[in-house]
């Protein structure tokens, strides 16, 4: 891994026009969605969905999301990280049905997942933590992790600037010297609360060039405007 001199995390130009609400659920029936009956319906739907997920997990049925950002993340980023022997103690932030199989990339004895939502524990690693990314110093000693992957969390719950500062600062503390911080995000108006390059705690890091990638940033020219940045402590 190499490190260039300048840090570039400005908004990334893309040939695609942002699609407003690309990741949001349909905004039709907005008034219906505010009713108590809809609230109950939604709860029941979610409970059923989690039961179905539990069955799929029980039978170890692997589930994947087929999008361009996932293709990049799963066929370029994760294999590059797996192939770097110095990345042993790994923390993956944010778990979902399509990230459960990522455990295959790492050693299960030294691979942790963390999610603020207790329901997402079922999609996490054997070593899973329910907490906010802001609090990772409660779970890991300073300089103890080799790699932290924060993909699809910034703009997906981790939105408030002060919280983002705390979270990235905590990542910097828990990473060892030379450890890697991977930040995957979507450069869409409704998924980028602010340009992440404005975050002061990110400036504690230096940009990193992951050898097989050959750059400190991957930009997908997809409709979700996926960006993956690499930083080294
Ligand atoms: C889009 S999902 C899945 C992210 C997954 N890492 C990926 O690669 O797509 C975002 C997840 O981040 C979690 N999340 C949001 N804010 C968080 C925070 N402050 N700390 C930890 N997890 C958070 C949510 O609960 C949700 O499960």
Image: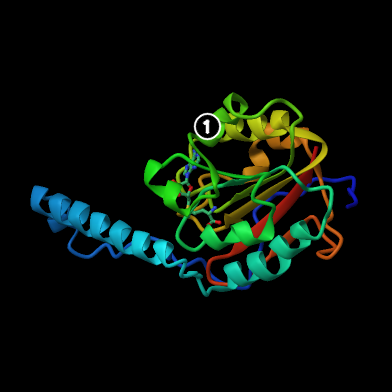
Tell me the residue at 53%/66% (across/down). 224
The answer to whether the residue bearing label 1 lies less than 8 angstroms from the nearest atom of ligand 1 is yes
- 94 sits left or right of 35 in the view: right
Residue 225: quadrant of the picture: bottom right
- Residue 115: where, in percent of width, then height? 48, 43
- The relative height of residue 142 versus residue 208 in the rendered view (above or below) is above
- 148 sits left or right of 176 in the view: left
Residue 184: quadrant of the picture: bottom right
Q: Nearer the viewer, residue 104 or 167?
A: 104
Image quadrant in which the C terminus is located: top right
| Residue that label 1 marks | 163
Residue 21 can be seen, yes or no? no
- Residue 49: where, in percent of width, then height? 29, 61
Neighbor class of circle 1 (other Cα within 10 Å; few <14, some 14-19, many 20+) is some
**Helix, strand or loop status at disc 1:** helix
Tell me the residue at 90%/51% (across/down). 2
Tell me the residue at 52%/58% (across/down). 100
Residue 127 can be seen, yes or no? yes
Colour theme: rainbow
């Amino acid at each position: 891994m190499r490190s260039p001199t300048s840090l570039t995390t400005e908004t990334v130009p893309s040939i695609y026009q942002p699609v407003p609400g690309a990741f949001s659920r349909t905004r039709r029936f907005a008034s219906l969605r505010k009713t108590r009956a809809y609230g109950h319906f939604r709860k029941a739907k979610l409970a059923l969905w989690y039961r179905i997920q539990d069955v799929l997990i029980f039978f170890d049925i692997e589930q994947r999301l087929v999008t361009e950002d996932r293709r990049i993340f799963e066929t370029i980023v994760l294999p590059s990280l797996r192939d770097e022997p110095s990345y042993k103690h790994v923390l993956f932030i944010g778990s979902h049905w399509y990230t459960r199989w990522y455990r295959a990339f790492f050693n299960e004895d030294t691979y942790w997942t963390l999610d603020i939502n207790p329901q997402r524990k079922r999609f996490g690693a054997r070593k899973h933590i329910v907490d906010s990314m802001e609090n990772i110093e409660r779970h890991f000693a300073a300089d103890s992790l080799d790699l932290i992957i924060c993909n699809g969390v910034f703009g997906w719950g981790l939105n408030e600037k002060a919280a983002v500062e705390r979270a990235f600062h905590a990542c910097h503390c828990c990473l060892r010297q030379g450890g890697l911080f991977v930040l995957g995000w979507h450069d869409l108006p409704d998924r980028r609360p602010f340009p992440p390059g404005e975050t002061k705690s990110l400036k504690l890091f230096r940009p990193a060039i992951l050898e097989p990638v050959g750059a400190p940033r991957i930009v997908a020219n997809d409709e979700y405007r996926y960006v993956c940045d690499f930083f080294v402590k």
